[in-house]
Every structure is written in C-alpha cells, then in structure tokens.
C-alpha cells in the first residue's frame, strides 16, 4: 500500500507530536501521532489501523493506479449518472439595477416563449423516459418575473415525473424581492425545494449595490421575504463583496440575528467576490473585483468572512472536492431562447454555445478545452480533486481564451489548512487516531 498523493499534511505547535491529514478525494480529516505518520510513509502500519486508513483514502493500492483512475474520473461518473441537472434561464429581465451584474452586457426585456417551454418540457420528459431524475434551477434575470411560464414548466414536469416514478425537483435563483409566502406555497406543491437569495452585506451597502430600478433599496423587502418563507423552503443566502467593502460584511450577520433570523432558519450563507462582467468590464475600480483566485486580498477576505459566518453559528460550505459543470454530461445551462451552454457566465457568448434544445448538443471538446487538466503537473498536484483546471470564465477574462488552466494551488496553499482548522474549532471536533 502507498500513501495517496492527493493529501495535505499539517503540523502545529498547539498539538506537539500530532499530524493532521486532509484527504482531498474524501474531504476526510484525521489526526495521527507522528509515529503512525512515519510508519504510514514506510508502509509499516498496524493491521488495526490499516483498514480505516484504506477506507478514508489515505492508503491506496498504487499511486500510479490512483493517478490513472483520476484521469478517467468523469467518464466513470458520467456513465453512472441518472440525474439531469439544468439551470433554466426563464428571462433576462430584472427588477433590480445592480451595477456589477455580469449579465448586463446581454440583459434585456426578453423571456422564454411558450414554444421554447414546450420544447424544454418535451426534451426533459425524454430524459425521464430514459430513466433519469431531474433537478432544475430556475434563473434569470429575475426568475419570478416569469412566474406563469415557470409554473407551466414545473407543473407539467412534476406531473410527468409522478406518472413515470421519477423525481422532479427545482430551486429558485432569485434576488428575493418577489419571494413572498403565497408564491412559495404554490411552488412547493410543484416541486420547489430551495431558494438562493442575495443580500450584499449590511443594509447600506446592499441598497447601494442592489437597488430596485427605481433607485430605492431592496434590503428590507428581501429580509421580510426570508422571514416569511424560511419554514417552507431551504434558503441559501449569498453575498457579493469586493476588495473595498468586505471587512464590513460581518455586519450583515449581526443584522440577521437582530431581526430574528437565526442559523437554524438558513441552510447556509456563502460570501462571493464580485467578478468582472461578461464583456470584461467592471463596476468601479477593476482591482476591487476578483479576476484571479490567488489575489492576496481575496485570500484574506475568504478567511476573514468564513470565520465570521461560523463564529455567529451560521453554516457555510465545508472544503469539498468540486469540479466545473462542464465536466458533467448531464449538467446544462438552458437559455431563454433554447440555446445550450456549459456555464451560466457564458450565456450571450455565441462562440461558447454548445447547441440548442431543437438541434441537441454538439461537440464542445475543443471550445471548452476539455481535458486541459490531464497534464503531468495537474495529475501530480495534491489539490487536483479541488480544482480540475479551475474556472474557465476567469481564465477567459484574463487571457481572452480558454487555454491552459486556472491554477488554484496558490489559493489552496494559503487557505485550505485554515479552512479545515476553522471547521474543527468552530463547528466540529477532530477524529483522532493514535
């Protein structure tokens, strides 16, 4: 047996004689004695420990075999997949005027037609007939501005799934201003499970960054809707920060608690950096937005904000293996016009369209530079299960093309150990092994 290459090893003066391991492929955390760690590397491990270490992915039969397995990981996952997941853009109209919106270059007063909705329903039912369950994220613009077409699609697919013994569920990606209790109650009956809302920091920042088209602030309306609906659906709260304002974002957590919105009422809170718009233009100073994951200010902000969320008792994502949706055959972005994409950030860019509902999906291997991470350097990198080539959107913004990788090694070197220790200290306890 050999120690997996997809592993990080951490030591610290607070735990002398102990070694903490983070296994990338399993997101498993172990604390070992330094003696056991030395034995591991020499393949001298007691039988009573070996089984656990194999189960958690610390020990593998062969590092070379594991490396080869990683090369084909998505082929295997796609072959087993029985779920069709789509982000469905119902409209590009929005009732907010967010100055940083990356959709602004192509947004407009357009919505999905009934004929396109019918085609979407037909193609989705064909997936159900092929034995697939279906999960949609309805998206915009503001998805609830297209509520009649949303109800039509969800109603017919919910009925079709019931007839076929399949699952149909959906979530809303919404700014939250129209997410009232009656609307949510109606949609829950059609399969609504969750809603992803946005509050951009404390009230004054949010109202400046996410005003209604009229210019008035939207913070109070969204807050009221969270209070009115949290018991009906799983709510994920997002928040978009930049280099100049992130230090004030913990004030949002205090405002939520002061309003009686407690950690048990929210599924999770995630703070995101503002990205440049789809045409590479930016809101304000370019350096205040994020165009690279290893920017020093972003590393600092990520650690600071994540710790603030956990200290207040709210949930936020744990470090987990992840990959871009482009790697998954059954994950799509469906535009209001029936165009198909592999990333929501690429909507409106015709050279990155991969097909249409009517014509099907074409070969996008070269366009999206598939397999770009299957290099010696990436396959040997311990962080591969957390990266797989990084973000094609950020890479295209920086270089003008999807070529090479958007390496996240510097970012993960800087934050991963601290993320793990935040989790151990603030919401879980270690799993020691002697």
Image: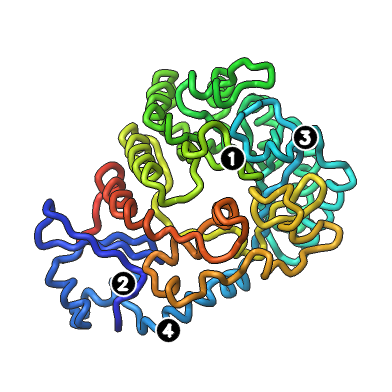
Q: Nearer the viewer, mark 3 or mark 4?
A: 3
Rate crowding at label 1 as few (under 14), some (14 to 19) or many (20 or more) other CA atoms within 10 Å: many
- Residue 155: which quarter of the image? top right
> Closer to the N terminus: mark 4 or mark 1?
4
Q: Residue at x 24, y 54 (%)?
A: 430
The image shows residue 16, relative to residue 297, as above or below, that is: below
Residue 37 locus on image (x, y percent) = 18, 71
- Residue bearing mark 3: 108
> Closer to the N terminus: mark 4 or mark 2?
2
- Residue bearing mark 2: 58
Q: Are marks 4 and 1 in contact (CB under 8 Å)?
A: no
Q: Residue at x 14, y 66 (%)?
A: 33
> Closer to the N terminus: mark 2 or mark 1?
2
**Label 4 element class:** helix
- Residue bearing mark 4: 65
Q: CA distance from mark 2 to mark 3?
A: 51 Å
- Residue 29: which quarter of the image? bottom left
The image shows residue 97, relative to residue 381, as above or below, that is: above
Instruction: Tell me the quadrant of the picture where the N terminus can be found.
Output: bottom left
> Closer to the N terminus: mark 3 or mark 1?
3
Rate crowding at label 3 as few (under 14), some (14 to 19) or many (20 or more) other CA atoms within 10 Å: few
Residue 137 locus on image (x, y percent) = 66, 45
The image shows residue 383, relative to residue 315, as above or below, that is: below
Residue 406 locus on image (x, y percent) = 50, 59
Residue 310, label in figure: none
> Closer to the N terminus: mark 2 or mark 3?
2
**Label 1 element class:** strand
The image shows residue 72, relative to residue 269, as above or below, that is: below
Q: Residue at x 44, y 77 (%)?
A: 376
Left or right relative to 52: residue 288: right
Q: Are marks 3 and 1 in contact (CB under 8 Å)?
A: no
Instruction: Tell me the quadrant of the picture where the C terminus can be found.
Output: bottom left
């Amino acid at each position: 047996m050999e120690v997996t290459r997809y592993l990080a090893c951490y030591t610290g003066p607070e735990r002398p004689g102990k070694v903490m391991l983070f296994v990338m492929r399993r997101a498993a955390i172990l604390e070992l004695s330094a003696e056991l760690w030395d034995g591991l590397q020499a393949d001298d491990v007691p039988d009573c420990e070996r089984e656990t270490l194999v189960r958690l992915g610390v020990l593998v039969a062969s590092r070379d075999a594991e490396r080869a397995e990683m090369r084909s990981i998505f082929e295997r996952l796609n072959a087993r997949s029985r779920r069709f997941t789509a982000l469905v853009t119902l409209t590009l109209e929005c009732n907010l005027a967010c100055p940083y919106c990356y959709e602004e270059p192509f947004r407009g007063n357009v919505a999905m037609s009934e004929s396109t909705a019918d085609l979407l329903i037909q193609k989705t039912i064909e997936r159900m007939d092929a034995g697939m369950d279906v999960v949609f994220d309805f998206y915009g613009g503001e998805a609830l501005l297209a509520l009649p077409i949303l109800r039509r699609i969800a109603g017919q697919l919910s009925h079709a799934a019931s007839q076929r013994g399949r699952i149909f569920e959906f979530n809303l990606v919404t700014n939250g201003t129209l997410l009232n209790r009656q609307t949510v109650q109606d949609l829950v009956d059609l399969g609504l499970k969750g809603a992803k809302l946005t509050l951009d920091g404390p009230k004054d920042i949010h109202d400046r960054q996410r005003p209604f088209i009229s210019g008035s602030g939207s913070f109070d309306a969204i807050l009221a809707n969270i209070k009115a609906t949290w018991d009906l659906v799983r709510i994920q709260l997002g928040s978009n920060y930049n280099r100049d304002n992130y230090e004030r974002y913990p004030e949002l957590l205090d405002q939520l608690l002061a309003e009686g919105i407690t950690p048990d009422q929210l599924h999770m809170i995630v703070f995101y950096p503002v990205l440049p718009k789809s045409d590479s233009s930016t809101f304000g100073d370019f350096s205040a937005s994020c165009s690279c994951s290893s920017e020093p200010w972003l590393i600092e902000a990520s650690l600071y904000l994540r710790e603030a969320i956990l200290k207040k008792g709210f949930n936020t994502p744990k470090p987990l293996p992840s990959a871009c949706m482009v790697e998954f055959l059954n994950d799509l972005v469906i535009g209001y016009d029936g165009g198909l994409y592999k990333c929501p950030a690429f909507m409106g860019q015709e050279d990155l369209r991969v097909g249409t509902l009517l014509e099907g999906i074409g070969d996008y291997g070269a366009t999206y530079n598939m397999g770009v991470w299957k290099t010696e350097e990436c396959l040997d990198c311990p962080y591969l299960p957390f990266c797989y080539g990084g973000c094609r959107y950020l890479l295209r913004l920086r270089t003008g093309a999807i070529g090479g990788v958007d390496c996240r090694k510097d970012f993960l070197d800087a934050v991963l150990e601290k993320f793990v220790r935040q989790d151990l200290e603030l919401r879980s306890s270690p799993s020691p092994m002697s």
